[in-house]
Image (cartoon, helix red, strand yellow):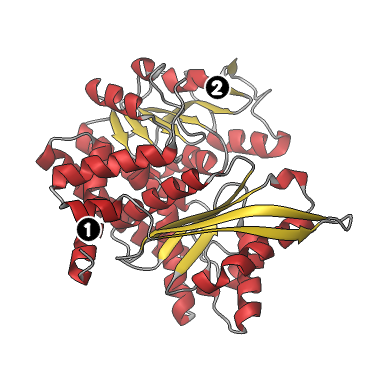
């Protein structure tokens, strides 16, 4: 399969959007590069008394619309270009759903499974010490990403508050409820995606109670499997997969039983009344809705011709390659791009910031209602751009996001 540089892909998308929008050269140049990049080394004491040096990044891509917002990844293959790309996509994502935020992303080159809990805490605190002066509710607000979680965020928040000797829980999001987290965050990414699917079914004339499949059965995939039936009033889940393989039953699988089985056994293998299938086969099943919720580039030029879903809802970051995106569009497959479909997480993170700021927290039903309203409005903004400019949905989303950021840059007098 062709190898992709994520930052090159992100830049190409941005440049194409700028051309369609007829942005001037200075504005285009501004939007093609991060406003600020920070790279650093972090010496950390290990449990055996030795020291290890880790490499970290924080990229603040654009802050014309508000402070940077984006996750922190702990991953052994982390690179500066991956972080740049994700920070850029987060910039467009927050703009597509019209949040008063910019885009950022961070990372540490490490594999958490190689370390003890105490060592992971030490890495988390070292990360904050390296970038603390660049963070804050009015500067840059991190969140979890790959191999980080609410506990990681709690350690980071505590380190930040220790450094500055103040209480500022809103400087980081997706924290445990006990220290300023919000109701509704656990399923926010999947819930936002399913809300988008509901609107897409109505828009494209697809049966919302038809068949669906989920590729990737982590948090987002599990929640999508459950919420699809709840929000759309039905539907038949015919297949799911994780990295080890998938299960299939054309007559339907019980989402709750599947989630319980995965959490209990650690895999999907052995699930009763289901056929074991290779993970990649899930992408090619004849279903109404497909949720890619796992790896980047899962739908690519080699399998896009065999994708039979009518709607593809991207819960993962970058699950469709540029070539595959064009193939799907030509074949009439409606793609809900990640910068729209997976925006539920950052929307509810924004809600958490708001609640932290005035120490008043909402009921979960209020979070769901407000998330639904924002995703629905964003979906129709994107479909409006698709119709107006005669472009594929991904570019429609890019046009909405890039236009809003460019407008903010111009109003500020930057260009």
Label 2 – label 1 distance at C-alpha:
41 Å
Q: Which mark is residue 85?
A: none
Among the 4 quarters of the image, the one containing residue 203: top left
Residue at the image point whose x is 31% and y is 28% from the top: 325
Could you tell me if the residues under marks 2 and 1 are in contact, i.e. CB atoms within 8 Å? no
Q: What residue occupies the far right of the structure in this picture? A: 48
> Which residue does the numbered mark 2 point to in the structure image?
279
Of the pair 186 and 58, the residue shown nearer to us: 58
**Left of 136 or right of it: where is 129?**
right
Among the 4 quarters of the image, the one containing residue 395: top left
Q: Position of residue 255 (x, y in %)?
A: 54, 35
Residue at the image point whose x is 65% and y is 22% from the top: 272
Residue at the image point whose x is 41% and y is 16% from the top: 302
Against 229, residue 22 (above or below) is below
The first of marks 2 and 1 along the sequence is: 2
Q: Secondary structure at mark 1?
A: helix
Structural crowding at the residue carrying mark 2, measured as other residues with C-alpha within 10 Å and reported as few (<14), some (14–19) or many (≥20)? some
Against 208, residue 1 (above or below) is above
Of the pair 331 and 255, the residue shown nearer to us: 331
* Quadrant where the C terminus is found in the figure: bottom left
Residue at the image point whose x is 12% and y is 47% from the top: 22
Q: Position of residue 74 (x, y in %)?
A: 62, 49
> Which residue does the numbered mark 1 point to in the structure image?
406
Q: Position of residue 208 (x, y in %)?
A: 32, 34
Q: Is any atom of residue 135 visible in this view? A: no
Q: Is any atom of residue 415 visible in this view? A: yes
Against 302, residue 145 (above or below) is below
**Left of 246 or right of it: where is 346?**
left
């Amino acid at each position: 399969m062709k190898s992709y540089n994520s930052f090159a892909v992100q830049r190409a998308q941005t440049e194409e959007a700028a051309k369609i929008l007829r942005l001037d050269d200075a504005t285009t140049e501004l939007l093609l590069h991060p406003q600020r990049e920070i790279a650093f080394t972090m010496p950390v004491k290990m449990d055996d008394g030795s020291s290890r040096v880790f490499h970290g990044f924080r990229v603040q891509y654009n802050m014309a619309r508000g402070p940077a917002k984006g996750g922190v990844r702990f991953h052994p293959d982390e690179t500066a270009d991956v972080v740049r790309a994700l920070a850029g996509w987060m910039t467009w994502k927050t703009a597509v759903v019209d949040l008063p935020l910019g885009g950022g992303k961070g990372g540490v080159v490490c594999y958490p499974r190689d370390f003890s809990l105490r060592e992971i805490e030490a890495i988390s605190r070292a990360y904050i010490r390296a970038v603390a002066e660049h963070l804050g509710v009015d500067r840059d607000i991190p969140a979890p990403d790959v191999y980080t979680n609410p506990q990681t965020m709690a350690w980071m928040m505590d380190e930040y508050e220790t450094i500055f000797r103040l209480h500022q829980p809103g400087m980081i999001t997706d924290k445990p409820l006990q220290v300023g987290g919000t109701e509704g965050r656990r399923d926010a990414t999947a819930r936002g995606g399913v809300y988008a699917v509901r609107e897409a079914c109505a828009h494209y004339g697809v049966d919302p109670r038809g068949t669906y499949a989920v590729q990737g059965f982590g948090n987002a995939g599990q929640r999508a499997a459950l919420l699809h039936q709840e929000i759309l009033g039905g539907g038949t889940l015919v297949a799911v997969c994780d990295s080890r393989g998938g299960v299939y039953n054309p007559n339907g699988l019980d989402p709750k039983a599947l989630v319980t089985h995965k959490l209990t056994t650690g895999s999907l293998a052995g699930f009763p009344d289901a056929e074991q299938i290779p993970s990649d086969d899930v992408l090619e099943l004849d279903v109404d809705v497909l949720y890619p919720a796992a790896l980047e580039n899962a739908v690519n030029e080699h399998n896009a011709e065999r994708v039979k879903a009518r709607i593809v809802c991207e819960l993962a970051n970058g699950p469709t390659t540029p070539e595959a995106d064009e193939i799907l569009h030509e074949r009439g497959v409606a793609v809900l791009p990640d910068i729209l479909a997976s925006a539920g997480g950052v929307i509810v993170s924004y809600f958490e910031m708001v609640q932290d700021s005035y120490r008043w927290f909402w009921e979960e039903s209020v979070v769901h209602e407000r998330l639904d309203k924002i995703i629905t409005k964003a979906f129709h903004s994107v479909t409006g751009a698709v119709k107006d400019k005669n472009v594929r949905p991904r570019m429609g989303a890019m046009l909405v996001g890039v236009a809003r950021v460019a407008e903010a840059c111009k109003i500020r007098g930057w260009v």
